[in-house]
Image (cartoon, grey):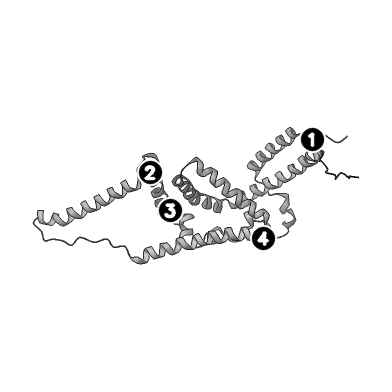
Amino acid sequence: MPEKITTEDLFNNLVETIADGVSKQKSVSFFEEEKSNSVVSGFNRLFGRQRPVHHILGGGKSADVLLWRNKKISASFLASATLIWVLFEWLNYHFLTLLCFALVLGMLAQFVWSNASGLLNRSSSQVPRLVLPDELFVSIGRSVGAEVNRGLQYLQDVACQGNLKQFLVVAVSLWVAAVVGSWCNFLTVLYFGFVAAHTLPVLYERYDEQIDGFVYNMLDQFQNHYKKLDSGVLSKIPKGKFKLKKHD
């Protein structure tokens, strides 16, 4: 008689598989057919990636910052974001309060600068003026508008192309984002996303082979265990058949 497979046995096997995958980091059997090729061409990247992470992130200065090519600049960005988050979330400051304090300090510094020469019996010195160029605001507006239009175009393409799988993935992702947004405010979500953008890409670039092998190993094992569950449990569940009644 064939061995009876229970849900508990499948769960125990799944836990053991995850533990083995973390310790050994083996490649999955799904890619064993490509072992005759080279290592690079025979190993599929995560989400079908074929280009380096730096090129996927744009290949410009923003990619250099996210991948910590210049550690001082990347650390300063992350420290600034952390400082802003601490001020608004932990110390309960408000944006208008900080803006007014910053303006007062700037005016005080210029006032002392302009009057210090008279107190020290020196010739008056010209106080430098801070003028933001108009091109800066135009560039920011264009960048924000381009990203918003790109996101809207992607959502419309998903909705109109008729790919049910992709549509469900995007819908579930938006639902998860809505649930996470109900747990904390927008600034905290934005900060966590900023931290993830500055940590996950560089970790993936450094340990891409281990992460790819582990993810595909888990996907393959989940698929195998689902097949066992389907053949041992789900297939035995009786399915109702609807028959039309004939009326004489």
Q: In this view, does 150 lie above or below 209?
A: below
Q: Is residue 57 above or below residue 85?
A: below
Give the residue type at disc 4. Answer: Ser
How many numbered circles does the render carry? 4
Q: What element carries label 1?
A: loop
Q: Do the residues labelled 4 and 3 touch (CB within 8 Å)?
A: no
Q: Nearer the viewer, mark 2 or mark 1?
A: 2
Q: What residue sits right under mark 4 in the picture?
A: 41
Q: In this view, does 232 lie above or below 44?
A: above
Location of residue 238 in the rendering, given as x and y in whole percent from the top left corner = 82, 38
Q: What residue sits right under mark 1 in the picture?
A: 5
Give the residue type at disc 1. Answer: Ile
- First of labels 1, 4 by sequence position: 1
- First of labels 4, 3 by sequence position: 4
Q: Is mark 3 on a helix, strand or loop?
A: helix
Q: Which residue: 75% across, 56% down?
A: 33
Q: Do the residues labelled 1 and 4 touch (CB within 8 Å)?
A: no
Distance Cα–Cα, label 2 vs label 3: 22 Å
Residue 45 visible in image: no
- Of the 4 image quadrants, the one containing the N terminus is top right
- First of labels 3, 1 by sequence position: 1
Residue 88 is marked as: 2
Distance Cα–Cα, label 4 vs label 3: 32 Å
Q: Which residue lies furthest to the bottom in this view?
A: 135
Q: Which of marks 2 and 3 is in front?
A: 2
Q: Nearer the viewer, mark 3 or mark 1?
A: 1
Q: What residue sits right under mark 3 in the picture?
A: 74
Image quadrant where residue 6 sits: top right
